[in-house]
């Protein structure tokens, strides 16, 4: 059995601490530096039983040309958008991700962005560093709010949102949730007020956070129309996928004051271009798509990815398969 691992030198997981699992399962490991052409990707996968990738894409034209030996493609990440799921399923190839390795981390990070924007932590840090703090009681910028006086709206109520709701309720906030796939009772069991529509979230909540996968139906779920329905002075936080928020509409909202502040760990184009107007906005917290990362989550991610690749190489249905019936 053989596993081909596409890796890079820029901080993505290399899973080195778990290479021993390949040896213990009599699996040959071939490491390939990513960034190659489609032809090079296909050639590198020759004879592989499973493939691991972090950022090397597997589009339809690559998947259609892979050896028939390939049984699984494992993404060392929460998403699997760089792999053409439909093409892989047609070839009988399992597509795997690790969707639940950083549920606590992302929720805590969202909470940090909420608190940071609500209480202007980065704003005041910048003011002190720039020498503007010159007297006691110094106040600047947009109004801060008491957390027990505000409402937080969650679009989607999966594992991350459930954790975030728990944290925000502990701080005394009111939490609303909208998830068309869940009953009101599920939200109420977590102390969350069910919203009947996403517009109700937009209209009622002081802080809004999308916690849903990026799909055609969720692309730009927060756009100019959505922002127009929001409260004046709304705060928008996004740690999911950049295109959930129409970035141009957000920038317009920030410029007009309709949007008071934003906390963004993800962007429509990543890395964020250096000419983005967001970089000049001191009421926006910007971080480099890092909400998932702690020592513990990184370790869990790598361990599971290796295990799923070994399961796929053996012809088993990997526990992380998003298309478990691919080889049925």
Image: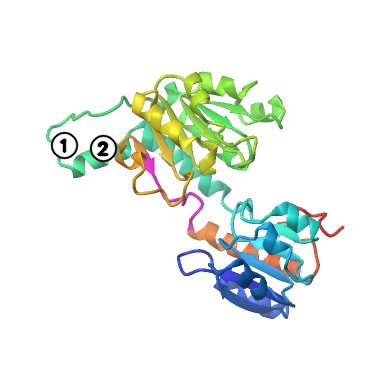
Residue 166 image point, x, y percent: 55, 35
* Label 2 Cα crowd, 10 Å radius (few <14 / some 14-19 / many 20+): some
Instruction: Name the residue: 80% across, 65% down.
Output: 316
* The label number, if any, that marks residue 133 in the structure image: 1
For the N terminus, the quadrant is bottom right
Q: Is residue 291 magenta?
A: yes
- Horizontal side of 20 relative to 69 (left or right) equals left
Question: CA gap, disc 1 to disc 2?
Answer: 9 Å
- Horizontal side of 157 relative to 65 (left or right) equals left
Residue 51 image point, x, y percent: 67, 68
- Horizontal side of 259 relative to 142 (left or right) equals right
Magenta stretch: dominant SS?
loop
Q: Residue furthest left?
A: 134
Instruction: Name the residue: 49% across, 60% down.
Output: 295
Which range is magenta?
A: 285-294
Residue 306 visible to an observer of this rendering: no
* Front residue of 150 and 282: 282
Q: In terms of secondary structure, where does tag 1 sit? A: loop
- Horizontal side of 100 relative to 25 (left or right) equals left
* The label number, if any, that marks residue 230 in the structure image: none
Q: In terms of secondary structure, where does tag 2 sit? A: helix
Instruction: Name the residue: 15% across, 31% down.
Output: 136
Q: In which quarter of the image is residue 18?
A: bottom right
Residue 294 image point, x, y percent: 48, 56
Question: Do the numbered discs 1 and 2 sit on residues whose CB atoms are within 8 Å?
Answer: yes
The residue to which callout 2 is attached is 124
For the C terminus, the quadrant is bottom right
* Front residue of 84 and 264: 84
């Amino acid at each position: 059995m053989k596993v081909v691992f596409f890796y890079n030198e820029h901080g993505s997981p290399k899973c080195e601490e778990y290479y021993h699992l390949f040896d213990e399962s009599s699996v040959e490991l071939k490491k390939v530096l990513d960034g190659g052409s489609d032809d090079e990707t296909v050639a590198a996968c020759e004879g592989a039983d499973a493939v691991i990738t972090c950022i090397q894409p597997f589009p339809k034209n690559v998947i259609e040309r892979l050896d028939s030996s390939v049984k699984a493609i494992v993404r060392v990440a929460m998403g699997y958008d760089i792999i053409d799921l439909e093409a892989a399923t047609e070839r009988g190839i399992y597509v795997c991700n690790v969707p639940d390795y950083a549920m606590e981390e992302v929720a805590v990070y969202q909470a940090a962005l909420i608190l940071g924007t609500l209480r202007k932590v980065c704003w005041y840090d910048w003011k002190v560093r720039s020498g503007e703090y010159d007297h006691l009681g110094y106040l600047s910028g947009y109004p801060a709010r008491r957390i027990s006086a505000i409402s937080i709206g969650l679009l989607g109520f999966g594992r991350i949102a459930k954790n975030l709701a728990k944290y925000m309720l502990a701080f005394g906030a009111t939490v609303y949730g909208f998830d068309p796939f869940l009953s009101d009772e599920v939200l109420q069991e977590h102390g969350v007020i069910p919203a009947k529509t996403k517009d109700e979230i937009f209209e009622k909540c002081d802080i809004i956070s999308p916690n849903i996968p990026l799909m055609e139906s969720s692309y730009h779920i927060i756009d100019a129309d959505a922002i127009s329905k929001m409260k004046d002075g709304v705060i928008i936080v996004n740690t999911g996928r950049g295109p959930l928020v129409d970035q141009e509409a957000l920038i317009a909202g920030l410029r007009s004051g309709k949007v008071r502040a934003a906390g963004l760990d993800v962007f429509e184009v990543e890395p964020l271009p250096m000419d983005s107007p967001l970089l000049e906005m001191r009421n926006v917290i910007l971080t480099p798509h890092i909400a998932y990362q702690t020592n513990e989550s990184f370790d869990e991610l790598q361990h599971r990815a290796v295990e799923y690749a070994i399961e796929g190489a053996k012809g088993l249905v990997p526990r992380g398969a998003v298309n478990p019936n691919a080889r049925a």
